[in-house]
Amino acid sequence: MGEDVITKLDDFREIIKQYKDLIPDELEEKYRKILRRMVEAKKRGDNKKFEVLITEIQPVVMEISKILQKIVEEVKSKDLVEGENILWFNRVTKGIFKKRLVQLWAITNKRAFIRDYEKDLVVAVPLNACEVVVMNQHRKSKGTHVGSFTGYAYGGFGGVAAGVSSSRSQSYGDLCFIQNGQIVLRFPEISDPQGVKNLVKTIQKQTAI
């Protein structure tokens, strides 16, 4: 039980790293310190302390989740149509000290799209008119988490880490959307590509006539 909790929190930490430029440093540091203490308590077999630390980290998780949710809401107001919700997304940034958003990759309940802010264009494909395949799948023992589940498909942003591998090694690959035998959209080197593909397949089944 405790190991499952730590694994999920560790996965969430990888998502935090991806959006480090948007999350206050002190909040990230607080999360990291509590998580480290939880790992230490688990190693000692101190279940009482472990439970106390769970109550300490929960409000921190909620605060960070609200920040991530705000990102999604900002996207919704700009790029989505009525009745459309983002289920998975990835922000592509440039810069070292001052990062700027250059692309948004997203999967909604209606389509997959890439929003290019530098070129001011959107490339999209309807989910009910394409096939989705995973290419170039491989595993890494260490790597930056690429892509986040928003949780809309799981009843709230608490599902942000849903579908992420619980293994210390992470699966990566290209998620490709195909029409008429041609790749029309590609999300390269995303985390847990099979999990994201399964999300798309579920949406396709739900919207099939």
Image (cartoon, rainbow, N blue to C red):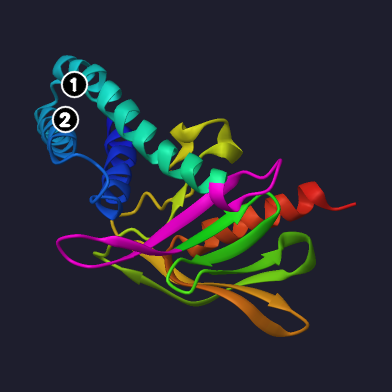
Which residue was labeled with disc 2? 38
Q: Is residue 34 magenta?
A: no
Q: Is residue 81 magenta?
A: yes
Please report the bounds of the magenta region as a residue range: 78-103
Which residue was labeled with disc 1? 53
Q: Nearer the viewer, residue 145 or 41?
A: 145
Q: Quadrant of residue 96?
A: bottom left
Say which element carries label 2. helix
- Evaluate whether residue 85 shows in this view: yes
Separation (CA) of disc 1 from disc 2: 6 Å
Residue lying at 23% horizontally and 25% vertically, measured from the top left: 57
- Evaluate whether residue 1 shows in this view: no
**Mark 2 residue type:** Met
The disc, 1 or 2, on the residue closer to the chain's N-terminal end is 2
**Mark 1 residue type:** Leu
Label pair 1/2, CB-CB below 8 angstroms:
yes
Q: Nearer the viewer, residue 173 or 147?
A: 147
Answer few, some or many: residues within 10 Å of disc 2's Cα (few below 14, many 20 plus, some between 14 and 19): many
Q: Quadrant of residue 179?
A: bottom right
Q: Nearer the viewer, residue 38 or 86?
A: 86
Residue ranking furthest to the bottom: 182
Residue 38: percent from left, percent from top = 16, 30
Decide if residue 93 is on the left or right side of residue 81: left
Up/down of 94 relative to 15, above or below: below
**Quadrant position of the N terminus in the picture:** top left
Residue 157: percent from left, percent from top = 47, 34
